[in-house]
Image: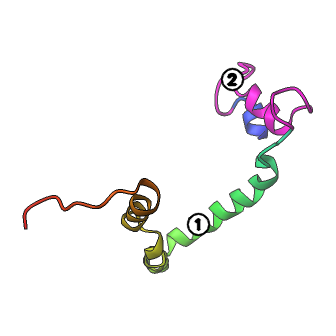
């Protein structure tokens, strides 16, 4: 966040990020939410550590590919098709219809 304060991501002293920075580290009551309401500041170091691990893993393309395949394979229960079918049945109360040639 020091880089943001220093103007590394925009014009220095432009005030462009003031509201965002204030919401994370500003004084209590200076904005509509309590200071760091979503705990962004507290979680940011672990977020950066996770990205460092991802960057390192990506260098090993064989392991990256292996983990990517395992991750995708583990998502079967949460597939979009299944989710839409479940919503159609349980929430929207509509029946599926086939589209295309038989």
Q: Can you say whether 96 is above or below 68 in the image?
A: above
Q: Could you say where residue 11 lies in the image, as x and y percent from the top left? A: 66, 22
Taking 102 as reference, is 99 left or right?
right
Q: Nearer the viewer, residue 76 or 35?
A: 76
Looking at the image, the residue that sits furthest to the left is 101
Quadrant in the picture for residue 89: bottom left
Residue 24 sits inside the magenta stretch:
yes
Please give the name of the residue rendered at 7% of the width and 68% of the height, measured from the top-left corner.
102
Q: Can you say whether 42 is above or below 29 in the image?
A: below
Residue 101's disc is none
Would you name the residue on which mark 2 appears?
16
Please give the name of the residue rendered at 75% of the width and 60% of the height, measured from the top-left corner.
46
The boundaries of the magenta stretch are 8-34
Would you name the residue on which mark 1 appears?
54
Q: Residues within 10 Å of mark 1 (few under 14, many from 20)?
A: few
Q: Earlier in the sequence, mark 2 or mark 1?
A: 2
Please give the name of the residue rendered at 46% of the width and 74% of the height, measured from the top-left corner.
77
Marks 2,1: beta carbons within 8 A:
no
The quadrant the N terminus occupies is top right
Residue 8 in view, yes or no? yes
Q: Can you say whether 65 is above or below 94 in the image?
A: below
Residue 70 sits inside the magenta stretch:
no
Secondary structure mainly formed by the magenta segment: loop
Mark 2 to mark 1 CA distance (whole Å)? 30 Å
């Amino acid at each position: 966040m020091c880089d943001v304060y220093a103007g590394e991501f925009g014009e220095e002293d432009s005030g462009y990020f003031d509201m965002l920075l204030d919401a994370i580290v500003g004084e209590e009551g200076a904005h509509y939410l309590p200071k760091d309401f979503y705990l962004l500041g507290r979680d940011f170091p672990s977020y950066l550590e996770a990205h460092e691990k991802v960057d390192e893993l990506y260098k090993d393309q064989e392991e990256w590919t292996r983990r990517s395949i395992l991750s995708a394979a583990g998502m079967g229960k949460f597939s979009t098709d299944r989710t839409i079918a479940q919503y159609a049945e349980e929430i929207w109360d509509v029946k599926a219809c086939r589209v295309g040639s038989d």
